[in-house]
Image (cartoon, grey):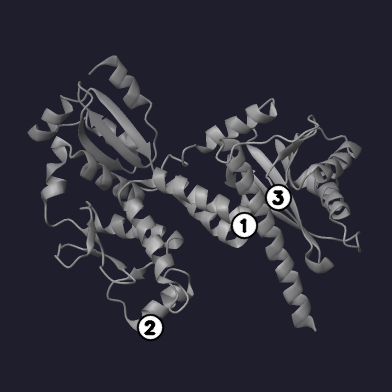
Amino acid sequence: MSDKLKEKIMSLPDTPGVYIFKDAGGGIIYVGKAKSLKKRVESYFSRFLASKTQAMVSKIADIEYKLCQTESLALILEASLVHKYKPKYNVSLRDDKSFPLVKITNEDFPAVCITRKRVLDGSRYFGPYTSAGLLREALKIIRKYFPYRSCEKMPQEARMYYKIGLAPVPGETSKKEYAKTIENICLILEGKTEYLIKKLLQEMNLKSKEQKFEEAARIRDQIEALSVMSESAGRYSRKEELEDLKNLLRLEKLPEKIEAFDISNIYGKEATGSMVSFYKGLPDKNNYRRFRIKTVETIDDYKMLAEVVKRRYSGSLKEELALPDLILIDGGKSHLSVANKELEKIGSKIPLVSIAKDRENIYTREKRYPIKLDTDTPALNLIRRIRDEAHRFAVSYHHILRRKKTIGK
């Protein structure tokens, strides 16, 4: 074994994922899944092996790996890579008829289930997979974000699934909408997660521009789930988004912790403010906060924003929550100015930016004119996600207050 290969094995993470063995020519000779990449790969070089496995190990010149959230999701990725590359030493997985498959039926509203037989009935099949148990776990994770019909379910059980959001709702979910869900599931099973994330990012951005924030939030949740299913986060990883934002704003350090504010003031009643917190590009929901406006009685978003910013960065909340690396305001130059005045009063120098709703221009303290970014830049994708989450969170609290008031009457 070469020193380079030894170093690579030593540096493998103790996390779930897929490992890829390559020969001296760069060809893929084996793909495997693991609960711990480090322990599994080390086992090939530290114990007695069958002659066939020894022959494979003797040909390993390089190792690559892909991280996954769980071993069950690594199972999905393993099967898709085996199907794609057909490695020499994975022949048994490709040819053995006893391994489980995923079946997607040929119907107007297709069902998704596990089977061990391929039938020529127009259904689509994915796999085979090495573990039926892990496959069931993986499908449960996928179903949480992409609800689907199950095979051979009794009507009563089917109703339970759509009531808890794990199946399409009869009479409400259109054939076209459900077909899109099934196609997204197929992309996951084919190992095309990066392509799917890119597609969903474009769809989310369109929904945001149309101010369909609830739909954008649902797609955002799908993107975040897909991002942690594998090491990828679209065209751009979360780290790339943070690096791009750091460079764009000329920050001294990576903005790992970002807090964003929005005001919900529908018809001037039950005005509320929201603060969402993101850590390393993902929602940090334990540090979300809601604010019921106390000092402003008129319809004045600016005064309401000033109240919320003041309450967050002074008093008890200042001591309770760690300060962010960056503050994001949903609004234009005037909103930025209001927030900045409040921060100046308390002597805070936390970097501050705002994003306008119309053209999504970025405003900063330092520049007189806005920063205009291309539609699909990493920094703008991150800012949009955070802005949309702040808006969704504010509106949801506003609805809660109005509902309570109505019930109270």
The mark closer to the camera, 2 or 3, is 3
Dot 3 or dot 1: first in sequence order is: 1
Q: Amino acid at mark 1?
A: Glu
Relative to residue 409, is residue 60 drawn left or right?
left
Residue marked by disc 3: 357
Relative to residue 342, is residue 320 drawn left or right?
left
Question: SS for tag 3?
Answer: loop
The mark closer to the camera, 1 or 2, is 1
Dot 1 or dot 2: first in sequence order is: 2
- Between 124 and 108, the one nearer to me in the picture: 108
Mark 3 burial class by Cα count in 10 Å: few <14, some 14-19, many 20+? some
Question: Residue at the left extreme?
Answer: 51
Q: Amino acid at mark 3?
A: Lys
User: What residue lies at 88% left-to-right and 40% top-to-bottom?
Assistant: 341
Image quarter for residue 154? Answer: bottom left
Dot 2 or dot 3: first in sequence order is: 2
Residue marked by disc 2: 156
Mark 3 to mark 1 CA distance (whole Å) = 10 Å
- Between 240 and 378, the one nearer to me in the picture: 378
Mark 2 to mark 3 CA distance (whole Å) = 45 Å
Residue 258 seen anywhere in this rendered image of the structure:
yes
Residue marked by disc 1: 210
Question: SS for tag 1?
Answer: loop
State yes or no: discs 1 and 2 in contact (Cβ < 8 Å).
no
Question: SS for tag 2?
Answer: helix
* Residue 22: image location, x then y, percent: 23, 28
Q: Amino acid at mark 2?
A: Gln
Mark 2 burial class by Cα count in 10 Å: few <14, some 14-19, many 20+? few
* Residue 191: image location, x then y, percent: 32, 46
Whether 192 is drawn above or below 168: the answer is above
